[in-house]
Image: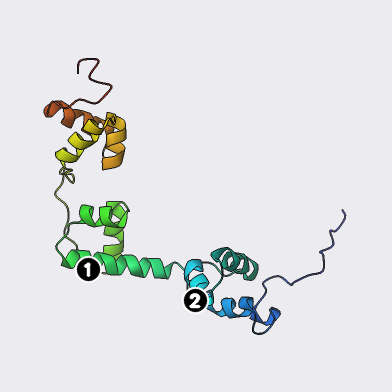
Amino acid sequence: MKQIKRKPGRPKGSTAKNFRPGSVSARIVPLLPKFRNTVIARMVGCTSELVRRIRLRVRIPVPTDETLQYKIEKIRRMTEAGLTVPEIAKGLGVKSVIVYKIARKHGLKVIKGIPGVRLSFDVNKLKALLAEGNTFSSAAKILGICNTTAFRWAKRFELYSVRSISRPM
């Protein structure tokens, strides 16, 4: 079996020593373990694509602690404001299960949501969206609810979409 010769070039796992002193790359490498690509790009004054390429070359993963610390702090502040877990989850853009896991792991006291009760949405928003000419499914997407929920609420309040006017509900 033939052995494939490696092309001469940089050794595996380059470090800051392999970069020219004072270059942008040499300034970026020490920041990689601490910050995310976009933050480093703003600090150094380069594109995040360049930071990404250097990160891949040096093989330093993107730190996840910063985002986790951000979520922990945000959960703590929202809980102090009196919000329930479903409301916090909606604010962070994650599922409630994740909020519960983070809270349990880091010892945060959270207010549980009432079982069987979902976050209510404004029926007036649904009315306005249907009046603008949106269908039930597009209005449901905009409001972040299920299509069936939008349809049932519309039926309850006798609202009609553009398509449903031509046929009875």
Extreme residue in the top direction:
167
Q: Which mark is residue 7?
A: none
Q: Is residue 119 visible?
A: yes
Along the viewing direction, whichever of 35 and 65 lies nearer the viewer: 35
Extreme residue in the left direction:
157
Give, as a three-letter code, the residue at label 2.
Answer: Met
Residue name at image x 25 percent, y 15 percent: 166
Within 10 Å of disc 1 (Cα), the crowding (few <14, some 14-19, many 20+) is: few
Q: Give whichever of discs 1 and 2 has the lower sequence position.
A: 2
Residue 103: x percent and y percent?
A: 26, 64
Residue name at image x 14 percent, y 49 percent: 114
Residue 126: x percent and y percent?
A: 20, 36
Within 10 Å of disc 2 (Cα), the crowding (few <14, some 14-19, many 20+) is: few
Q: Can residue 108 be seen in this view?
A: no
**Disc 1 to disc 2, how far (Cα)?**
28 Å
Q: Name the residue under label 1.
A: 77
Residue name at image x 68 percent, y 82 percent: 17
Extreme residue in the front direction:
132
Judge whether 117 appears above or below 131 on screen. below
Residue 8 in which image quadrant: bottom right
Residue 47 in which image quadrant: bottom right
Where disc 2 sits, the SS reads helix
Give, as a three-letter code, the residue at label 1.
Answer: Arg
Residue 41: x percent and y percent?
A: 52, 70
Judge whether 16 appears above or below 144 on screen. below
Left of 103 or right of it: where is 38?
right
Where disc 1 sits, the SS reads helix
Extreme residue in the bottom direction:
21
Judge whether 151 appears above or below 94 on screen. above
Q: Mark 2 points at which residue?
A: 43
The C terminus, quarter of image: top left
